[in-house]
Amino acid sequence: MSKRETALEALKALLVAACPGADVKRNADVPNNVGPGGYLILRDGDPGEPEVTLSPPSYAYEHRAVLEILVEGGSDGTPETLLDTIFGDIDMAIATDPILGGAVDHCEPEAPDVDVLGSDAGSPLRTARLNIVLIYLTSSPLG
C-alpha cells in the first residue's frame, strides 16, 4: 500500500475511534439523512507538489485531506453543540497521536469553514469543512 493510502486510512481509523457516534465514510456522497451522531466524509484531498530531494530520490508531501462534517442536532437538540463536540474529539485524538500510529510524520487540522445546508428531510444541516494536513515522506511521486 502506498504511503498516501496508508496515511488516509490511518486518518479514517482515527476519525472512527474519535467520533464513535458518527457515521464515518471515505469519498462518499452526501446522504439524504444524517444520524444523531453526525456524518463525516473524508475526502482524499490534494497531496500538492512535493519537495523533492535527490540521491536517493525522496518526496516530502503536505497532503491536505478534506473532512466534511454534517450534523442535524445534538444531545441538547442544537447542531452547533454536536459540531463543537466533534471538533473537540477530533482535536484531542490528533493531539494524542499526531503521527497516526507512524503512518505520517505529522498530522494537523486547519480551521473549519462552517455553514448551513438546506435539507429535503426537513431541518437544515449544519456543515463544516476542514482540511487536515498529512505530512509524509515517500520514495515515489505516486505516493
Image (spheres, helix red, strand yellow):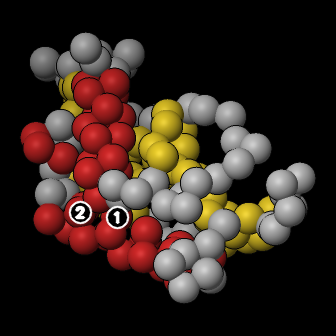
| Residue 70: assigned label | none
> What amino acid is at disc 1?
Ile
> Residue 52 location in percent, x, y?
30, 30
- The picture quadrant where one finds residue 57 is top left
Q: Mark 1 points at which residue?
A: 90
Q: Can residue 69 be seen?
A: no
Q: Residue 43's image quarter?
A: top right
At label 2, which amino acid type do we have? Ala
**Residue 133 location in percent, x, y?**
39, 52
Q: Which of 100 and 36 is in front in this view?
A: 36
Measured Cα–Cα span from mark 1 to mark 2: 5 Å
How many numbered dots are placed on residues in this image? 2
Which type of secondary structure does the marked residue at label 1 adopt? Answer: helix
Camera-nearest residue between 130 and 47:
130
Residue under the image location 22 percent in, 34 percent down: 137
* 48 to 75, vertically: above or below: above
One can see residue 118 in this view: yes
Q: Quadrant of residue 71?
A: bottom right
- Secondary structure beneath dot 2 equals helix
**Would residue 80 be found to the left or right of residue 89 on screen?**
right
The residue beneath circle 2 is: 93
Instruction: Kindly check if marks 1 and 2 are in contact, taking CB atoms under 8 A apart as contact.
Output: yes
Image quadrant holding the N terminus, namely: top left
Q: What crowding class fits label 2: few (fewer than 14 Cα within 10 Å), some (14-19), or many (20 or more)?
A: some
Using the image as rendered, state which of residue 45 and residue 120 is in the foreground. 120
Measured from the top left, where is residue 117 in percent x and y?
A: 81, 62
Q: Please give left or right for residue 128 compared with residue 23 in the image.
A: right
Residue 103 x/y as whole percent: 18, 37
At 28% from the left edge and 18% from the top edge, which residue is drawn?
A: 2
Question: In this picture, is 85 found above or below 99?
Answer: below
Residue 27 sits above or below residue 91 on the image: above
Residue at the location (76% across, 44% down)? Answer: 32
